[in-house]
Amino acid sequence: MSEVESSERLVHVPLGDRSYDILIGSGLIARAGGEISTRIKGRKAAIITDEHVGPLYLDALMDSLQTDGIEAVSLSLPAGEKTKSFEHLMRVCDLLLEARIERNDAVIALGGGVIGDLTGFAAGIVRRGVRFVQVPTSLLAQVDSSVGGKTGINTRHGKNLVGVFYQPDLVLADTAVLNSLSKREFRAGYAEVVKYGLIDKPDFFDWLERNWKDVFSGGEARAEAIATSCRAKAEVVAADERELGRRALLNLGHTFGHALEAATGYDSSRLVHGEGVAIGMVLAHQFSSRLNLASPDDAERVAAHLKAVGLPTTMGDIEGELPPTDILMQAIAQDKKVKGGKLTFILTHGIGQSFVADDVAASEVFSFLQEKRPG
């Protein structure tokens, strides 16, 4: 393993023989070949990217691999949530088999959460598991989806309902690539950063309220926010890898958010994942207040911060009409966080005091959503 430069952060995810490192810093794509070759024995790799990211970073990654003696093939898929499908999963699997990627070779996800989830799923099922490297190129992927081993695709029944837990062997979070993100994409990723403060790190939420402008402008504050987020997720994943208990807290805002994404048909022009999570986190705090579990002041504080950075905070902020509440409820009932037919939500007693509520009455959720609908 190469030495970590002083300006970089290293976060270790301790999972026994499935442990791995997250490297966070600028310029990591140019050094990817060296970092991968010290950890993975195979001399071949397959890179999966998308049509937005590939033109920006694929050549640099291929050059880095070639420099370190790794022969690579690549596949570029359409960008967007709809790529997480059976059709594109088969395309990735076919490429890996045609390229004769073996168990000790590397499958590399170069992209955001969609590419990471899809590629990780393929890596987990081809030859019953090949080596997997995440090179996340969005803030959302760097702080959330690239860490923890959740992979999967969407179906007409809902989001992420088909997949496997499959840990990467390495995560290379190159902070320099975030400069190419649109403001909307960066804000969407920032919602997941805020989530870690709201789960159980109120001091981090306080810090973000004071320093969010520096996080957005880049530099040390951005790297520190990413590292803090990754450490928070690594800690939870190490304690509960397969989401049998505490890891469910990472879904704060996601049950509402996923339902809203489904309601828009995963149309990224209307709503992207991080925006759904932002609205979902506000709804979770408001719902907790409605159930007399938390102060309404906390919900207002969460909404105020997310609104200040430019994120949507209400269902009325979503462009276009939403389907009736009973359709939203169907999406919530299909969510993978349902247990025994009972609705499971991540609720809160206040900022940094989230908990798993396993038996939430559907009637309460329905009336709450009816109340929060626009118009």
Image: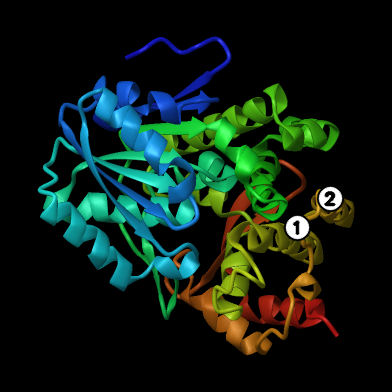
Asked if the residue at tag 1 contacts the one at tag 2, i.e. Cβ–Cβ closer than 8 Å, the answer is yes
Q: Quadrant of residue 121?
A: bottom left
* Quadrant showing the N terminus: top left
| Element type where label 1 sits in the image | helix
Element carrying mark 2: helix
Q: Identify the image quadrant of residue 284.
A: bottom right
Q: Which residue shows up at 60% across the image and 69% down it?
A: 268
In the image, 66 versus 151, the foreground residue is: 66
Residue 188 vs 373, above or below: the answer is above
Residue beneath disc 1:
285
Q: Is residue 52 left or right of residue 264?
A: left
Which amino acid lies under the numbered mark 2 shown in the image of this protein? Answer: Asp
Distance from Cα at disc 2 to Cα at disc 1: 7 Å
Query: In this view of the protein, which residue sits in the foreground, 340 or 264?
Result: 264
Q: Can residue 338 be seen by looking at this rendering?
A: no
Circle 1: residue type:
His
Please name the residue shown 25% across and 64% down the image.
91
Which residue appears at 30% of the width and 27% of the height? 36
Please say whether residue 370 is visible from this viewpoint.
yes
Percent x, y for residue 354?
66, 48
Q: Residues within 10 Å of mark 1 (few under 14, many from 20)?
A: many
- Residue position for label 2: 298
Q: Residues within 10 Å of mark 2 (few under 14, many from 20)?
A: some
Q: In the rendered view, would you say 316 is above or below 48?
A: below
Residue 257, position as x, y percentages in the image: 62, 65
State the residue in front, 277 or 47: 47
Residue 211 on image: x %, y %: 81, 31
Quarter of the image where the C terminus is located: bottom right
- The answer to which quarter of the image holds residue 252 is bottom right
**Apparent side of residue 23 relative to residue 204 in the rendered image (left or right):** left
Work out whether mark 2 precedes mark 1 in sequence or the reverse, and give the earlier one: 1
- State left or right for residue 198 relative to residue 107: right
